[in-house]
Amino acid sequence: MTLANGNVVTAAPGGPSRAAPGRQLQELAMAALAPVICAALLVGLLSAWVATGAAGTIAWVRIQVSLAAIPMRAFTPGAASAVGGATTYLVIRNLSNSPDELVSAHSPIARHIVLTTRPAGGAVGPRTVVPDLVIPAHAKTTLSPFGNDVVLMNPAPFEAGRSVPLTLTFRHGGTITVQAAVTPPGAP
């Protein structure tokens, strides 16, 4: 391009070009159009979701485990291995508006872990294996050898350790791994 003073100006390949002011405004408007359309679409979809009443149906399930302990089966390794299963003490809080269920538990020290319940009244009567344990909404549930419990069947010796990893799986609340403290026999 030749200017009025006779100087020749050339644009470098790939370098910026000077568009006319009207063209710059048009390019800016086109660049802003996509986010504006996306925002309008999102607002429309969210409004429809709220208008149909579906927005109120989400229940966030929040589970907390505030106590996790596995009592030693006995004070000596020989006596402990003769006992067999190991019971747990767990305090589980469901902070959500919906009940949840504890559906399984896993630990590297036991191949088989069962969820159990006892008849009303505590330690009297045999344990019954159940498929899940209900954790009511906005409630604290205590699991122990005297009622609903998680039982590690024939675990590897764990009494010499300070804690045992225990992974709890809830139907709606997902998976929580806790370090269950190893406590004296019979103590939470």
Image (cartoon, rainbow, N blue to C red):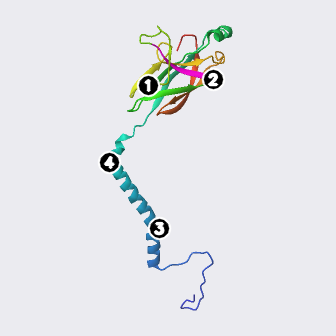
Whole-number angstrom distance, CA of label 3 to CA of label 2: 59 Å
> Are there few (<14), some (14-19), or many (20+) residues within 10 Å of tag 4?
few
Q: Earlier in the sequence, mark 3 or mark 4?
A: 3
Q: Nearer the viewer, mark 1 or mark 3?
A: 1
Residue drawn at 50 percent across, 78 percent down: 19
The kind of residue on which mark 2 rests is Arg
- Which residue lies under the disc numbered 1? 134
Q: Nearer the viewer, residue 83 or 141?
A: 83
The kind of residue on which mark 4 rests is Thr
Q: Earlier in the sequence, mark 4 or mark 2?
A: 4
Whole-number angstrom distance, CA of label 1 to CA of label 3: 54 Å
Q: Nearer the viewer, mark 3 or mark 2?
A: 2
Q: Measured from the top left, where is residue 22 in percent x and y?
A: 44, 78
Whole-number angstrom distance, CA of label 4 to CA of label 2: 47 Å
Q: Main secondary structure of the magenta part?
A: strand
Mark 4 residue element: loop
Vertically, is 164 above or below 10?
above
Mark 3 residue element: helix
- Which residue lies under the disc numbered 4? 52
Whole-number angstrom distance, CA of label 3 to CA of label 4: 34 Å
> Are there few (<14), some (14-19), or many (20+) residues within 10 Å of tag 3?
few
- Which residue lies under the disc numbered 2? 111
Residue drawn at 57 percent across, 10 percent down: 185
- Which residue lies under the disc numbered 3? 31
Q: Measured from the top left, where is residue 70 in percent x and y?
A: 57, 17
Q: Which residues are magenta?
A: 110-118
